[in-house]
Image: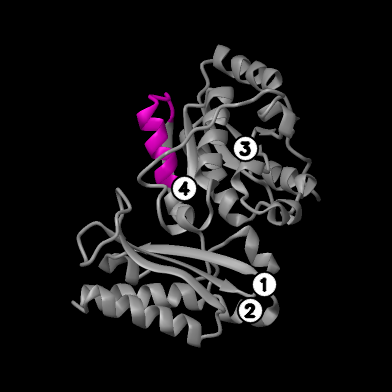
Amino acid sequence: MTAAAVDIVRTVEELRSRVASWRSEALSVGLIPTMGALHAGHLSLVEAALKKYDRVIATLFVNPRQFDRPEDLAKYPRTEDDDATKLASANAHLLYAPNVDEIYPSGYSTNISVSGVSSGLCGGDRPGHFDGVATVCTKLFLQSGADGAFFGEKDFQQLRVVQQFVRDLNIPILIHPCPTVREDDGLALSSRNKHLSDEMRTRAPVLHQRLRAAAEQLLNGVPVDIVMKESKDFILKSGFDRVDYFELRDAENLELLKQNSLNSRLFVAAWLGKVRLIDNIAVIPSQLSC
């Protein structure tokens, strides 16, 4: 039997009315911000939210301010009906799916920009991307009045950006990081994976495999510059077309590291054809055993 779709609201007024009703019953509220094309990784965030909060809202908004190339925005998948059905099966309570004018009405002129943690990595390759993330998330947090919001660690830089502006702006919401969800072969779940051909899909797990190998090298004392060069060369020789970055950074402030530390994390972004894949792992022994 096909699950019924979750309830959908499309305006701030409707959203706040629903939340106010829950608040009148002293119910807590968790939020899952998404751009749709939902997969098991998103649904794991719903599962995590249900363990902490009485009511769970997922948002679906393909945010134009996160795209530096119009063609990427145009081809981003829109699968609202399927997403709503998946959310119902995951027991989410509400889907907030506003249109662009509801988020950015005529005359809108405010932008949230986060320095420091937004520099480099994907911030260096996608100008303005994290301004778009910070701006829309700020609006979603304030529109919903949620107690907590959930973000996957696959987009680790995004997570740090969100944590930074929430702290800086004193927004009363808890940010809950959630582990990356992976396929059996290690590939991190992503909406972009559906664009991989069968051949590219067989190559894609190399990113996670190389991250783990690099972490092991670092833990064994191999110098950082050697590990980074060998890792980039290995990825290219494995059939990837380009490596945007393979870097070791501090997990808290995302500063580049020249030597391994107790709080380091490896980050990679690489292209298979026209598909850009990203991944990251902590450089700790327990990470390599899972």
> Earlier along the polypeptide chain: callout 3 or callout 4?
3
Amino acid type at circle 1 is: Leu
Residue bounds of the magenta highlight: 158-173
- Vertical comparison of 175 with 152: above or below: above
Near mark 4 (Cα within 10 A), the count class, few <14, some 14-19 or many ≥20, is many
The residue at which mark 4 appears reads as 158
Spatial CA span between label 3 and label 4: 18 Å
| Residue 254 belongs to the span the image colors magenta | no
Circle nearer the viewer, 1 or 3: 1
Amino acid type at circle 4 is: Gln
Mark 1 lies on a secondary structure that is loop
Looking at the image, can residue 63 be seen? no
> Earlier along the polypeptide chain: callout 2 or callout 3?
3
| Residue 167 belongs to the span the image colors magenta | yes
- Vertical comparison of 251 with 106: above or below: below
Spatial CA span between label 1 and label 3: 26 Å
Tell me the number on the disc at residue 200. 2
> Earlier along the polypeptide chain: callout 4 or callout 1?
4
> Earlier along the polypeptide chain: callout 1 or callout 3?
3
